[in-house]
Amino acid sequence: MKNKIALVTGATSGIGKAAAITLAKLGYNIIATGRRGNRLEELKSELPEGIDFLPLIFDVRDREKVVEILQNLPERWKAIDVLINNAGNAHGIDPVQTANLDDWDAMMDINVKGLLYVSRAIIPGMTERTSGMIINIGSIAGKEVYPNGSVYCGSKHAVDAITKGMRMDLNSFGIRVVAIHPGLVETEFSLVRFKGDEGKAETVYQGIEPLVAQDIADIVEFAVTRPAHVTIADVVVLPTAQASATIVNRNSKS
Ligand code: NDP
Ligand code: 8X3
């Protein structure tokens, strides 16, 4: 039997990279996307032997490029079994009255519209084949709101709503739609949020044992290995030190 195919957006670091490697270990051939081509090459070298790999370099904000690349996949890569909509980040952490408009554009354009562009290109193949799984990476910020995070939280609330809507629209096609909503995961996320300031990024995980990308990839593995009649619809996963978006026990690291 030929290998199944998974497409993971934002596979150049963090959760996406861990998910791509985990799926490859399960025997999936991998389509991995991101803007940093060198990172995609690195990822290739970390995949098990015998796994086919297709790196695609594009910015999910670029609607024309997304459509052009994903609608013209090589024939043997077209039948995507699992789509992981993971590409995304927070940009800045500021109150609405002073926040930067470019940061707002980035978050809405990447986290929401990018997810939609990719999904719209891949879903018709799934509906035609009446099979497939879509895993959207949301956030605790899509379930709750915290100060200075209104637009990131808004973008992730949108992911939550879009996921529910996808599940409804795709219900009659037997397509499984999954959302995973993590709390604090130590990746490059905070470095991006704080625009490369390593000191500030470190404070996010101070005094706690945060989740790591593999914790999320383990949930991806669980979701894709369930029998066809089971959809893991909605998972919120937090580090034990975190009780909510705003309540974090900073004295919990032994
Ligand atoms: P990372 O910064 O480590 O990874 C982000 C990934 O998204 C990278 O591969 C990056 O690739 C890709 N990406 C970002 N912007 C674009 C773009 N414009 N076009 C294409 N790809 C893009 O962060 P995480 O792994 O933590 O984040 C992954 C997802 O998990 C995000 O959706 C994030 O919101 C979510 N999340 C993260 C949490 C955390 O605490 N870390 C908690 C909850 C949710 P490249 O830069 O090469 O383009
Ligand atoms: C990332 C988690 O709490 O930094 O989505 O918004 S948080």
Image: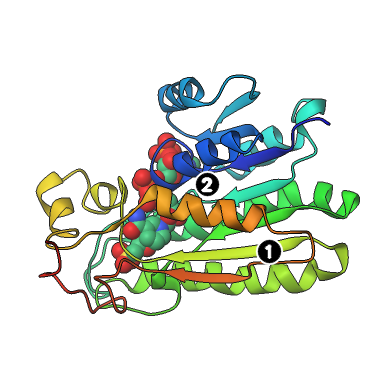
In this image, 57 relative to 54: left or right?
left
The residue beneath circle 2 is: 61
Asked if residue 175 is positioned above or below residue 66 in the image, the reply reads: below
In the image, is the residue at mark 1 within 8 Å of ligand 1 by its beta carbon? no
Residue at 43 percent across and 47 percent down: it is: 15
Element under label 2? loop
Residue 23 badge = none
Which quadrant does the C terminus fall into?
bottom left
- Asked whether disc 2 touches disc 1, contact meaning CB atoms under 8 Å apart, the reply is no
* Residue at screen point 77% across, 25% down: 74
Q: Secondary structure at mark 1?
A: strand
Occupied quadrant, residue 188: top left
Mark positioned earlier in the residue sequence (2 or 1)? 2
Nearer to the camera, 112 or 252: 252
The residue depicted at 66 percent of the width and 53 percent of the height is 224
The residue that disc 1 covers is 177
Q: Amino acid at mark 2?
A: Arg
Work out whether residue 219 can be spotted. yes
Left or right of 227 on screen, residue 8 = left
Within 10 Å of the Cα at label 1, are there few (<14), some (14-19), or many (20+) other Cα atoms?
many
In the rendered image, residue 3, in percent from the top left (x then y), is placed at 75, 32
Q: Mark 2 or mark 1, which is nearer to you?
A: 1
Q: Does 252 appear above or below 134? A: below
| Rendered location of residue 18, percent (x, y) | 45, 42
**The quarter of the displayed image where residue 182 is located:** bottom left
- Closer to us: 48 or 105: 48
Q: CA distance from mark 2 to mark 1?
A: 22 Å
Which amino acid, by three-letter code, is at mark 1?
A: Val
